[in-house]
Amino acid sequence: MRPFFKNHDFDFATRIALGGVFHRAADVGEVLATVEHVPHGRAPAWVRAWTATADRLVTGAGARAASGHRRSAAAQYLRASNYYAVASDQAADHEEFAGLWERHREAWDRFADLTDVAVERIEIPYEGTTLPGYLFRSGPTDEPRRTLVHNNGSDGSVVGAWVGGIADALARGWNAVTFDGPGQNAALVRQAIPFRPDWEKVITPVLDHLAARPEVDPSAVALMGISQGGYWVPRALAFEHRVAAAVADPGVVDVATVMLSQIPHPLVTLLDEGDRDKFDREMGWALKLSPATAAMMAARMRPYGVTSAFDFFTAARAYALTDEMIGEITCPVLVTDPEHEQFWPGQSRRLYDALRSPKDIVAFTEDEGADSHCEPAAAGLRGERIFDWLDEQVPARG
């Protein structure tokens, strides 16, 4: 497909926005009209344009809700939430990001309040605090059903969870859950809880919470990991064996490879040698030459809970799966393998080859319009293939 922007980040985000159309989290005209107001490579213009579109929808949604048009109001709040999240991709600093994130969450919560879908805010006990989430029910509350747990990636929004799994699950009679894990969404912005590599310490409390819910069949819980969730989910599966089936989209064996590939070899050598001061000093000089790169680095470091570049790259290296870990996975696993995977190329096949449990791998191609990381412009095809597989692994009762 011809790019919308020469700037790769802008182009990828535009495709993500358009991918939301399939599940009514975006409208084609709104997306195309918005990007017309963004000059190539201008981050402030990107934030202004998407925020303006979202603001307009929020105003309209409020008026429709006041007039009793709940469905139209819910639909507009959903799209507005998505557009605020898209705007936040190019936020200048954490203050701007956090403000846009709060507006995205407020619009999402208004959608949750007004939609016809049965949705409940949940709090998952976690190490002396709680992790916020949402439980969507596809049927009567007193009937145990198979349930999809959607595990977001490093910076996926709650609307991304809707487009990437929740809407498809509900359409096929599944319950669905999404949650803010350490370093994600509210756990990051409101609670300042950082990422952790040992994700079984997160998934086990999620499963414990769901097992006590009357509407959840604990023997029929599937787990889907998106983006960096393609590492977290297999990691959790190596230690937590109550999951009936799982999806890694894409498969991620070593998170740090994409980061390390973007720095010169001498810096990698300093990292290997543990020379923190020199590494940070030389990175600091390089970042002074590119404010945009410095802002990107600050945003990427924040979920890891660090401010030192050395600490960031060192922490990321802990997010790696060994063959021994992968060998401990027992449930069926589906690995997606999109053509032109730009962040972890080749790792889907590495994960698939190392799995000893029942497994499948599914390709998504450019000719189908389904290439690139997490198949952003092919929500329909992606959902059909993934949920056909999930329906086969965890069939509905009755």
Image (tube, helix red, strand yellow):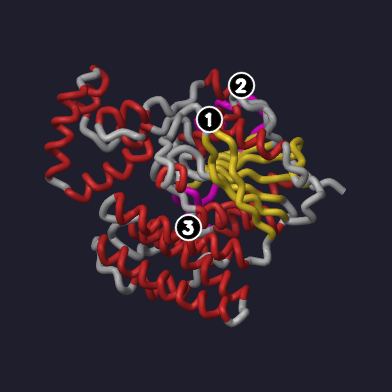
Q: Which mark is residue 105?
A: 3
Label 3: how many residues lie within 10 Å, few (<14), some (14-19) or many (20+)? many
Q: Does the magenta stretch include residue 313?
A: no
Name the residue beneath numbered marker 1. Answer: 127
From the viewer's side, name the closer residue of 66 and 275: 66
Q: Distance between the residues labelled 1 and 3?
A: 24 Å
Does residue 40 appear left or right of residue 65 in this picture? left
Task: Give the SS element for disc 1.
Answer: loop
Label 1: how many residues lie within 10 Å, few (<14), some (14-19) or many (20+)? few
Tell us which disc is closer to us: 1 or 3. Answer: 1
From the viewer's side, name the closer residue of 133 and 171: 133
To which quarter of the image does residue 336 belong?
top right
To which quarter of the image does residue 334 belong?
top right
Q: Which mark is residue 313?
A: none
Label 2: how many residues lie within 10 Å, few (<14), some (14-19) or many (20+)? some
Amino acid type at circle 3 is Arg
Does residue 12 appear left or right of residue 72 in this picture? left
Amino acid type at circle 1 is Glu
Tell us which disc is closer to us: 2 or 1. Answer: 1
Q: Where is residue 216 in the image (x, y as percent from the top left)?
A: 74, 43
Q: Residue 328 carries which label?
A: 2
* Up/down of 68 relative to 87, above or below: below
Q: Which residue is drawn at 74% across and 37% down?
A: 218
> Reading the chain from its start, which is encountered first: label 2 or label 1?
1
Q: Which residue is drawn at 60% across and 29% down?
A: 237
> Reading the chain from its start, which is encountered first: label 2 or label 3?
3
Specify the segment rendered in magenta. 348-375
Q: Where is residue 16 in the image (x, y as percent from the top left)?
A: 45, 58
Task: Give the SS element for disc 3.
Answer: helix
Amino acid type at circle 2 is Glu
Q: Is residue 347 visible?
A: yes
